[in-house]
Structure formats: C-alpha cells, structure tokens
Image (cartoon, rainbow, N blue to C red):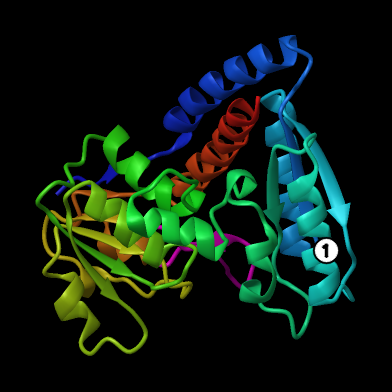
Amino acid sequence: MDTTSLIGKELAAAINADTKQRAAALAETGAAPRLALVIPNDDPASAWYVKSLNRAAERNGIACENVDLGVDATAEEIRAKLTELSLDPSVDAIMLQTPLPKGVGLDDVSSAIASAKDVDGVSPLSLGLLAAGLPGFPPATAEAVVELAKFHEIPLAGRHVAVVGRSNVVGKPLLQLLLAENATVTIAHSRTIDLPAVTSAADVVVAAVGRAGLITADHVREGAVVIDVGTNEDENGNITGDVNADSVTGKASALSPVPGGVGPVTTALLMRHVVQAAESAR
C-alpha cells in the first residue's frame, strides 16, 4: 500500500497568508498585533522555540516581545507578570514558555493569563471553555491535528480515532475538538492495557505521548491514518516522532512526517490566534 505523506507546509502557508493580511489591516489602523512571550527558563529547546516564534511573528507582521524572567522566577513572580500583561491593553496575546522553574507547576500560574489573550489555550478557563463548546482558543497543537486532517480530506465524522496521550496540551483538548467533528474517540495512555489492540481498532491513530518510535505496524490496522504529534530528540540531536515511520509505511494509508507535518501548522495557528485576539480587542 502507498502511504500518503500528510505534509503541513501548504496548509501552514495558507494560514499564514490570511494571518499576514489581517495583521496588515490592523497595522493600518495604528495597532499592529502584539504578542508577549514570557520566558522563565534557560532551556535550549525553549530558546529555539522562542526564536522560531519570533521569526514567525515577524513574517506575519506581528510585534513580538520576549519577557525574560530568569530561571529563578517564583510562582508569585510569574503570576504577577502574567497578570500585568493580561491587564496591559497594548498586549493582545500571551504565551508562557516551558519548562517552568523547579517547583513551579503550570497549574500554579496559568490561570493568571486572561482567556482572551491565552492564545495557546493553557489556562484552566480556556480548557473549560473548550470542553463546554464555548468560544476560546484551543491549544494550537491539538487544533493542528484536526486542521491537518481536514486539509488532506481525511473524514472524521463517525470514524473511530484513537489518541495516544492524555496531556492538557494535546490529548484532552484534542478529544474535545474531535468530538466537535462527530468522531468517536478513544483516549489511550501509559496505563492502557494492550495498547496495540486499542489502536489497531481505530480508523485514525494520533500519537501524542512523547516516546520516540512507540507506535509501530503492530499498533496500526491496514489502511489506517496515522498522525504523529511527537517531537523527540534522538542520539544525534535530530527531531523524531512517536511513530516508527519505517514500520508503519506501507501499512498505513497516510502518515504525517516529523518534522514537517503537525509542527508548521501549529506555529501558523498560533500566529492566527494572535491576530484573532487583536481583532477581538479592537
């Protein structure tokens, strides 16, 4: 069987083209969209991601400010800065970068981000709005999975989707987004008994557990679609997914590559969220 590659580049480009046009329209009124990236770490991977977001913002006509709080920032200091930015009318969007300092949990600080500015959907309020089907920003990675499937004309309504991973960043919000598309969803995780039996019963398998090469041909039925959300670093410093691509190729009807699949779409959606937040604030 030929396995189609679910590349995200073309979709990301289309999203970015729309975002750039809308950002330019806002700039013409003297109010370009403004994103604040709050950075309480010195993690190399986070630093790379911040640079990537800065470049994406610049390409799309979005003003981006890096707010470096340092690795010793306390939960109180992080919350205070997030509250300050939430109240600042010149800031349209806020993203809190992880990992957080030792002893600080995301639950300790994320609620300080105003939901109208929470463009990556990390706060409890944003997640609650998503679960209730109310307007808000979903986590961009979870949204990217659905958008990538739609772009490649993969039907979701009525189909069985198995999501491997139950994080608040991907697994849980993706459950809500898939239900909104009328999919039947199974959430699997580290304590699922006989994972291959669960995933091989699905029409679509989404791997979002953070374990390189976990999903193999044994986890996928013939002709299933596999969407890989994993971003793991191998021994050579290269990014690899949660799916063993060589094993699955030829058995799956479609597979998203890592890198180049979900990732570009995620970044594009984040920039679109920033512009949407700015439009709502004007």
Our reading of the magenta stretch's main secondary structure is: loop
User: Residue at 67% across / 17% down in the picture?
Assistant: 26
Answer above or below: position of 221 versus 2.
Answer: below
Secondary structure of residue under mark 1: helix
Considering only vertical position in the picture, is 163 above or below 74?
above
- Residue 134: give x, y in percent of width and height: 38, 47
The residue closer to the viewer here, 33 or 39, is 33
* Residue 59 vertical position relative to residue 164 in the rendered view, above or below: above
Q: Percent position (x, y) of residue 276?
A: 56, 31
Residue drawn where x is 16% and y is 49% of the image: 182
Which residue is at 28% across, 37% downward?
Answer: 150
Asked if residue 252 lies left or right of residue 85, the reply is left
On whether residue 229 falls in the magenta region, the answer is: yes
For mark 1, what is the residue?
Answer: 80
Q: Is residue 112 magenta?
A: no
> What range of the chain is rendered magenta?
228-242
Residue 42 visible from this viewpoint: no
Left or right position of 15 against 191 = right
Residue 66 appears in view: yes
Give residue 155's quadrant in the image.
top left
> Which three-letter amino acid code belongs to the residue tagged 1?
Ala
- Give residue 59's quadrant in the image: top right
Look at 14% across and 64% down and name the residue there: 202
Image spot of residue 257 (x, y percent)? 41, 50
Q: Is residue 42 left or right of residue 275?
A: right
Residue that sits furthest to the top in the current view? 28
